[in-house]
Image (tube, rainbow, N blue to C red):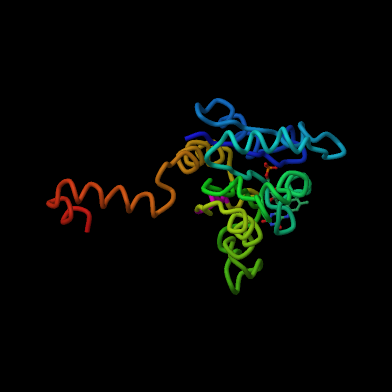
């Protein structure tokens, strides 16, 4: 499985967690990590054909970003507007992303407990990430469970450091889609019915 991570941080040099993740991703086999701020430059301009060719060369697309005002930093939106075009990602003939997998890799300043009804952020991350989920739906990609690191404002360096391997395990998990895991289990049960007891 080939994984493309689009890293959307305005200044990785000042980052605590996304830079650590980006560096870990760069060293990870089968993963292409792309720093969108470096690629797009100050005007956030992208060569549509280059970016689309990269998407086509990968099976799983990951949007990596720090949570800014309940969404992504603007460079990711600039990339989406330029690259996910009519006839490629949607509309007639726009089925080029169909069948790929998609997920978000996000860090938040606020703690996990704030991302609930009654918490000071009121809503869950699943609710805040709905525009990304629907982008995946419209473009025919399978939306996978996001990896969210909460509470960066209070996190100590050891926790940030440990998050690198947890993040890598999550985004490279070939069975992140529960349907993929289920069909593997069913194949195993078919081959060896006694396994059914162990699985249930
Ligand atoms: C402009 C801006 C907006 C932010 N908005 C949010 C927010 O809506 N929710 C939140 O939990 N944290 C918010 N934060 C905190 C960032 O999510 C946090 O600092 C970031 O995840 C740190 O990542 P980094 O170490 O890679 O820079 C915001 C930070 C900035 C600078």
Name the residue rendered at 63%, 43% in the picture: 64
Which residue range is magenta in the image? 145-149
Name the residue rendered at 52%, 53% in the picture: 142
Q: Is residue 39 left or right of residue 54?
A: right
Q: Is residue 44 left or right of residue 188?
A: right
Of all residues, the one furthest to the right in this rendering is 43
The relative height of residue 58 versus residue 142 in the rendered view (above or below) is above
Residue 160 image position (x, y, % from top left): 56, 40
Closest to the observer, 182 or 159 = 182
Q: Is residue 134 left or right of residue 189?
A: right
Name the residue rendered at 62%, 60% in the picture: 134
- Where, by quadrant of the figure, is residue 35 drawn? top right
Residue 178 image position (x, y, % from top left): 39, 54
The relative height of residue 64 versus residue 123 in the rendered view (above or below) is above
Q: Is residue 193 left or right of residue 69?
A: left
Residue 131 image position (x, y, % from top left): 66, 60
Residue 18 image position (x, y, % from top left): 64, 39
In the image, is residue 105 part of the stretch drawn in magenta? no
- Where, by quadrant of the figure, is residue 129 drawn? bottom right
Magenta residues: mostly which secondary structure?
strand
Q: How many badges with numbers are in the image?
A: 0
């Amino acid at each position: 499985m080939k994984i493309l991570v689009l890293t959307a941080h305005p200044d990785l040099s000042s980052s605590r967690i996304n830079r650590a993740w980006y560096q870990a991703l760069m060293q990870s086999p089968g993963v292409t990590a792309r720093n969108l701020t470096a690629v797009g430059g100050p005007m956030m301009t992208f060569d549509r054909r280059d970016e689309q060719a990269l998407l086509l060369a990968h099976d799983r697309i990951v949007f990596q970003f720090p949570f800014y005002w309940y969404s992504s930093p603007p460079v990711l939106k600039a990339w989406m507007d330029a690259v996910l075009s009519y006839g490629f990602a949607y509309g007639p003939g726009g089925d080029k992303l169909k069948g790929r997998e998609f997920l978000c890799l996000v860090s938040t300043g606020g703690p996990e407990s704030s991302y609930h009804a009654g918490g000071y952020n009121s809503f869950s991350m699943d609710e805040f990430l709905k525009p990304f989920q629907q982008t995946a739906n419209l473009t025919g990609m399978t939306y996978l469970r996001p990896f969210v690191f909460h509470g960066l404002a209070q996190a100590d360096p050891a926790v940030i450091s440990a998050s690198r391997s947890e993040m890598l395990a999550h985004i490279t998990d070939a069975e992140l889609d529960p349907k993929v895991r289920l069909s593997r289990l069913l194949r195993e049960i078919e081959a060896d019915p006694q396994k059914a007891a162990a699985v249930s």
